[in-house]
Image (tube, rainbow, N blue to C red):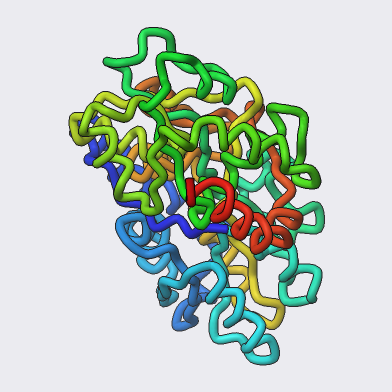
Amino acid sequence: MRDQDAVAAPMPASSRRAILGAGAALLGHPALAQAQRWRGREVVATAFGGPSQDLIQRLVFDPIVQETGARATQTPLLSAQAFARMRAEAQSPQVDLFMFSGGQEKPAKADGLTQAIPAGANFAGVPAHLKDPDGHWIAWGLVTEGILYRTDKVATPPRSYRDFFRPEFEGRIAFPHITNGYGTDFLVMLAKTFGGSEQNMTPGFDALRRIAARATIFRAAAEVQTLFSTGDIWIMPYDGASAMRSTAMGIPVGYAVPEEGAPYSLLVGCVARRSRNADIASAVLDGHLAPAVQAAIAREVGWAPVNAATQLPPDVARYMAPTDKLATLDRDAINTNRPAWTERFNREISSR
């Protein structure tokens, strides 16, 4: 659906000590005490690039390398490209650990491209619905969507997708084009809000048509801050990390979890079937799931934790939906119907 090439929000000085200590916490991983057998071996993992890759290198990969003598390489790849590479190298994988954000882990398992991952110490903290029952993949982060709004313009914070139809928001709304994954999710959530579903999108198109005439339609994530900074846009559907970045830039943007639930993307790891480094990959994923690392990723990048043991300060938690407030969308139906929905969106919505 989308890849999470997030721009890191500036990090308050008060949190730096926690981040510096997070890497040290990994050295207590039970597997690492007997991992000298990894010396000289190399684990190769895909990554989402940008500041998130640098952060994870510092907090996860570097401590494992320093403790065990193993080598580690992160290769930035979009999820679709990573999946294509997994298929192409199925018989002789050059990448051990694949990171996906678009749901590719499920067809990868179905096609026999993955293997069960040895459980790490932190795996137990991840809820069952965020990991494969057979152990072929596990989530290590969440990108949670919802409603972003200007806190200095909106007296009563939004609570529902129905609030986009409040009279005071007429002409003050922006929403993403359907070619942006968040735009697709907004359309689906409107359909669900007004009695439809992924199999019946007419209520969603009808609802979107009601606000489109006086709304701003945008495509790129970089436009979120630009639109809010003008003061003319007060509300839009997007992800909590963008609200966090806006606030860090001095734009007063809040994040609301809709009562209908927050759509989300899973950030997951899975191991190539014929990789001989599943043990090292498990330690890498376990490192992602360490509570201190989860909290650091949340604060610096804006991705919500999946380990229930993670404690977030209020100034970070307010930009993320808790795991019991998520709205699970039928991604298979969305991917199948996206071309037809895009044609209809261009005809009925963006051409107005």
- The residue positioned 43% from the left and 53% from the top of the image is 27
Q: What percent of the width, then of the height, locates residue 166?
A: 49, 16
Q: What percent of the width, then of the height, locates residue 38?
A: 51, 75
Looking at the image, residue 193 lies above or below residue 132: above
Q: In the image shown, does 203 or 247 lie closer to the viewer?
A: 203
Q: Looking at the image, can residue 263 be seen?
A: yes
**Where does the N terminus fall, quadrant-wise?**
bottom right
- The residue positioned 23% from the left and 27% from the top of the image is 231
Looking at the image, residue 196 lies above or below residue 85: above
User: Residue extending furthest bottom?
Assistant: 92
Left or right of residue 341, residue 256 in this image: left
Looking at the image, residue 180 lies above or below residue 281: above
Left or right of residue 156, residue 131 in this image: right
Q: In the image shown, does 179 or 87 lie closer to the viewer?
A: 179
Q: In the image shown, does 179 or 251 lie closer to the viewer?
A: 179
Total numbered labels:
0
- The residue positioned 24% from the left and 41% from the top of the image is 226
Q: Looking at the image, can residue 286 be seen?
A: no
User: Residue extending furthest top?
Assistant: 155
Q: What percent of the width, then of the height, locates residue 130?
A: 68, 45
Q: Quadrant of residue 192?
A: top right
- The residue positioned 63% from the left and 88% from the top of the image is 88
Q: In the image shown, does 97 or 260 lie closer to the viewer?
A: 260
Left or right of residue 218, residue 97 in this image: right
